[in-house]
Amino acid sequence: MLDIDMSEVPTKREANMGQWLALRNLGLVPVASPETFEWPGRFLGLKRDSSTWAVFFGVPPGIVYDPVAEPDGKQDAALNAAFVLAKHDPRRGTEPGSGTESVGTVELIALAAEAEGPMREVPSGEAVEGRGLLGDRYERGAGTFSNPRGRGYDLTLVEAEALEELSAKGVELAPIEARRNLVVRGIALDDLIGRRFRVGEVECFGQRRCEPCAHLERLTRSGVLRGLVHRGGLRADVLSSGGIRVGDRVVALA
């Protein structure tokens, strides 16, 4: 489906394929009526007489790759389910960042002890490798979106510039209300996706965008979801333990 070498595909059973695809700005979209679906391109299909997914193509569709049989491209098969591989956003990568290429500054650190609980501002935080900021709901695995098999739940960041732009649009949102652990200035967080970076003493890895959602809007106010599309920040893994303080630098690593 992706036309890449199989060595690049995770093989461990516990791998979160949804997140692995998200790193490539991709996701699987379920087909509502698979039995009548036709598509002039590749899509995943589950045949009624099989428990194995195959790659289909064409109108009408036929199998072009079956992991348990030799593909002949001529088979027609009734489908129980189907998925199309689609981009999360076809415009990804075209929006200009608001910061510099490689260096920023921490302006605010915020923690919430419980899921949906109030955020509290702190002058410094202690990051725990593989977990997050000590005292935060995600460090304890108790956040709304916590996933013990997932990545990108340790630390969240958002650009101060994005929140200022939101306010300029008439949607007032205090930095602490963004419900991100770190508010930073002077660095384009999109540039850190798929890269290692350092915040204070802590080394991190940028997993994917921390997009806004209806849950965030419900906890804040109307207009936040629309106003922060593609500007909601970054989800990151914590690769090393250490301290983070207000005023610390955010530095992209080679």
Image (cartoon, grey):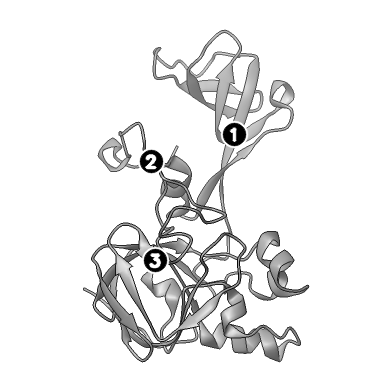
Residue in the foreground of this view, choosing between 135 and 89:
135
Q: Which mark is residue 83?
A: 1
Precedes in sequence: disc 1 or disc 3: 1
Identify the secondary structure beneath mark 3: loop
The residues tagged by marks 1 and 2 sit, at their Cα atoms, a distance apart of 17 Å
Relative to 16, residue 243 above or below: below
Q: Identify the residue at horizontal 69%, vertical 25% (top origin).
A: 34
Residue 86 placement, left or right of 220: left
Q: CA distance from mark 3 to mark 2?
A: 22 Å
Q: Position of residue 89 (x, y in %)?
A: 58, 59
Amino acid, disc 1: Phe
Residue neighbourhood size for the residue with mark 1, other residues' Cα within 10 Å, grouped as few (<14), some (14–19), many (≥20) = some
Q: Considering only order in the chain, which callout, 2 or 1, is on the residue closer to the N terminus?
A: 2
Q: Can I make out residue 40 in this image?
A: yes
Question: Mark 1 or mark 3, which is nearer to you?
Answer: 3
Q: Amino acid at mark 2?
A: Asp
In the drawing, what numbered circle is on residue 3? Answer: 2
**Kind of residue indicated by mark 3:** Ile
User: Which residue position is annotated with label 3?
Assistant: 193
Snapshot quadrant of residue 166: bottom right
Which of disc 2 and disc 3 is earlier in sequence?
2
Q: Residue at x 38, y 41 (%)?
A: 3
Q: Are the two marked residues, 1 and 2, in contact with CB atoms closer than 8 angstroms?
A: no
Residue 150 x %, y % = 42, 48
The image position of residue 133, as x and y in percent, is 38, 68
Quarter holding the N terminus? Answer: top left
